[in-house]
Amino acid sequence: MEKVTLTDLHGLVSARNENCVSLFMPTHPTGREGQQDTVRLKNLVTKAEAELLERGVRSTMVRKIVEPILELPLDKRQWAARKQGLAVFRSEEMLESYWLATRLGESLIIDERFHVKRLLPALNLYPPFFVLVLSRSHLRMLRGTWYGCETVLPRDVPTNIIEALNLQPADRGEQVHSGRRGDVGKEAAVFHGQGGHRDTLKDEIAEYFQLVEHAIHPVIRDSGWPLILAGVDYEMAIFRDVAAHLPINDETLEGSFDYERDDEIYERALPIARRSYAEVKSHALDTLVDFAHTGRASYEVEKIVPAAHQGQVETLFVNPQAAEYGRFRPETNWVEFTTRRRPELDLVEEATEQTILHRGTVYAALKVELPEKCAMGAVFRF
């Protein structure tokens, strides 16, 4: 309830039902206004009940849809910890709710899809990211999201170099490295010591980090999130060499972290993730400004919406408070505008949804980041 991630958004925009309820309201952690939050929620639910009945939904189904929303204040711990806004998404099959650190206006939308653009500013505050804690004895990878982190190192990644390379002590101060290649059912023993070809410690660390890189590469590649390294300079330099094609952040956490807790590492990495996110967003915004009106980017709704449906939007900047009303006709690839200000006709929401579905990047744009009276801007794929 305290997290909203890109995965969450994808799940919400993928859902389809005749009666998808999207409910938004401001909340107040303390004070007199906070005492009215329960009343506000009940009033919105009453409004939802009336609208669902008008849509021809049976009264038994209406109760099934709205009762879980009314039960939210009964979770005393969560209700007492509420922040600046509450977003609830409810259908016959789904219930998702989020406490947001960003202020929300009061709104209720019932449509065949959930409306998610109001969640975008929350991602700006706490962007998702990865931290790879490099260590020869206690390697970890963390995924940071809202208010915390979790360990996400793939199961097949050994967490120490001894396990990874099958290093075993041998006579005369030598090391035996049980090789991973050779005849089926056999292991090739490689001796390191006096004479012959001697592998240095750097070589062994590089071999270990190659195994790590190979395992985490699909995770990093598919997420598009920044990878922050934590560790001693010597080992981070080796990892950069063996993983030069990974999107590794320039800023790092320097030091030994073998005895530092995950949450402590997360708190130290979060400012780096925010700066990295801001830099990526700034670069994307520069691209939008530089290529607008050239065919490579546009601020025009009638160009952005069809491109989003066709998976051609690489980056979308959205003013979450803005709306443009109309319908997209896929059979003619045409946008028709209307003066009817109905939420289900919001083309900005539609462009947001389609960009997320097609794995594009969506940013909540500040008003100063878009031209005056412009609801959104897009950079296209080619």
Image: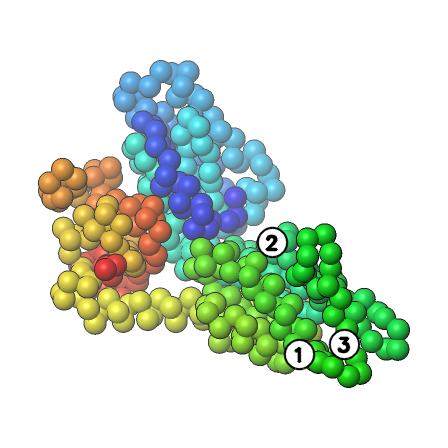
Label 1 Cα crowd, 10 Å radius (few <14 / some 14-19 / many 20+): few
**Sequence-first disc among 2 and 1:** 2
Identified by mark 1, the residue type is Lys
Give the colour scheme of this rendering. Answer: rainbow
- Label 1 or label 3, whichever lies nearer to me, is 3
User: Residue at image x 61%, y 68%?
Assistant: 209
Looking at the rendered image, the quarter that the C terminus falls into is: bottom left
Please name the amino acid that badge 2 sits on. Answer: Pro
Query: Of helix, strand and loop, which one carries label 1?
Result: helix
Verify CB contact (< 8 Å) between mark 2 and mark 3. Answer: no
Identified by mark 3, the residue type is His
**How far separated are the C-alphas under marks 2 and 1?**
24 Å
- Residue 25: which quarter of the image? top left
Marks 1/3: CA distance?
A: 13 Å
Q: Position of residue 275 (x, y in %)?
A: 45, 71
In the rendered image, the vertical position of residue 78 relative to residue 186, given as above or below: above
Q: Provide the residue designation for mark 1.
A: 202
Residue 154 is labelled as 2
Query: Which callout, 2 or 3, points to the residue nearer the camera?
Result: 3
* CA separation in Å, label 2 and label 3: 30 Å
Determine the image quadrant of residue 111: top left
Q: Nearer the viewer, residue 171 or 133?
A: 171
Q: Mark 2 or mark 3: name the one nearer the start of the chain.
A: 2
At which x and y percent is residue 170? 85, 71
Q: Position of residue 167 (x, y in %)?
A: 77, 67
Which residue is farthest right?
171
